[in-house]
Image (spheres, rainbow, N blue to C red):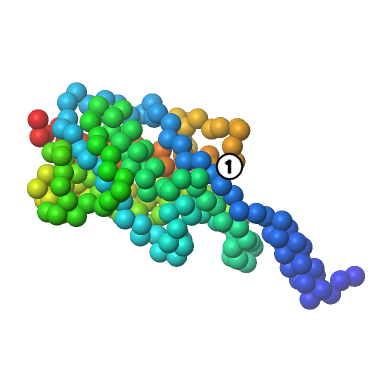
């Protein structure tokens, strides 16, 4: 019969063996049309700028790093990468969401918005920072996309600043799960879709878009 110490050592060895078999994962960032996004009757156009990466150590200063797989002791055993950099893809996804909302959206994927310094070709500009953009396995699988959105007029005046957050898992019957891809990819894309929906349908932002007409 194993002693308590021997049992702990055996369980630790088993965990090491299991986690050693885990390899880095690559996911495709894909935004699907969201049936919950309703069109506005009229709204002014908006330029969407690249969001600043404020994820800290979570992102390893790598725009393709989007998560990790962790062992029972919180040790990271593998990383999750996106096939394409997430900052550019997020601009495209937000533009797609605004377009579905009936708002003309100009994509600016190569630079962040600097008030009163960055030229804007539309009445409004959207920028901000991302605090979380990840899919992780820590006992359970979860994904989290969050950040601060900042909405400006053409002159660079800040009209709205708001924290937006989306987490999975949660009830989301509108998301179409793809059985052909990994759970990491499904969960992250579902969180991105929720984040985009929250931004483009935000009532305060919507009020400013429509009131300008």
- Give the answer, above or below, for where 74 lies relative to 209: below
Foreground of the two, 204 or 18: 18
Residue at image mark 1: 183
Furthest residue to the top?
Answer: 41
Q: In the picture, which quadrant includes the C terminus?
A: top left
Percent x, y for residue 198?
32, 40
Q: Quadrant of residue 201?
A: top left
- Give the answer, above or below, for where 76 lies relative to 189: below
Foreground of the two, 5 or 91: 91
| Figure label count | 1
- Give the answer, above or below, for where 80 lies relative to 33: below
Q: Residue at x 28, y 33 (%)?
A: 98
| SS label for mark 1 | helix
Q: Residue at x 15, y 38 (%)?
A: 122
Apparent side of residue 55 relative to residue 126 in the rendered image (left or right): right
- Mark 1, residues whose alpha carbon is within 10 Å: few (<14), some, or many (≥20)? some
Foreground of the two, 133 or 4: 133
């Amino acid at each position: 019969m194993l002693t308590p110490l021997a049992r702990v050592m055996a369980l630790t060895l088993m965990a090491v063996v299991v986690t050693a078999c885990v390899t880095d994962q690559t996911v495709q960032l894909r935004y699907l049309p969201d049936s919950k996004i309703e069109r506005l009757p009229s709204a002014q156009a908006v330029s969407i700028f690249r969001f600043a990466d404020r994820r800290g150590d979570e992102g390893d200063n790598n725009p393709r790093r989007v998560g990790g797989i962790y062992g029972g002791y919180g040790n990271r055993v593998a990383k999750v990468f996106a096939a394409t950099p997430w900052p550019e893809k997020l601009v495209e996804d937000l533009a797609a969401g605004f377009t579905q909302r009936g708002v003309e959206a100009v994509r600016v994927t190569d630079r962040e918005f600097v008030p009163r310094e960055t030229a804007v070709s539309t009445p409004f500009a959207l920028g901000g920072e991302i605090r979380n953009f990840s899919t992780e396995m820590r006992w359970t699988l979860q994904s989290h996309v969050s950040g601060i959105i900042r909405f400006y007029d053409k002159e660079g005046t800040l009209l709205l600043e708001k924290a937006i957050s989306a987490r999975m898992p949660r009830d989301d019957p509108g998301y179409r799960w793809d059985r052909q891809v990994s759970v990491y990819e499904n969960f992250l894309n579902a969180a991105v879709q929720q984040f985009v929906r929250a931004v483009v349908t935000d009532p305060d932002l919507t009020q400013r878009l429509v009131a300008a007409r």
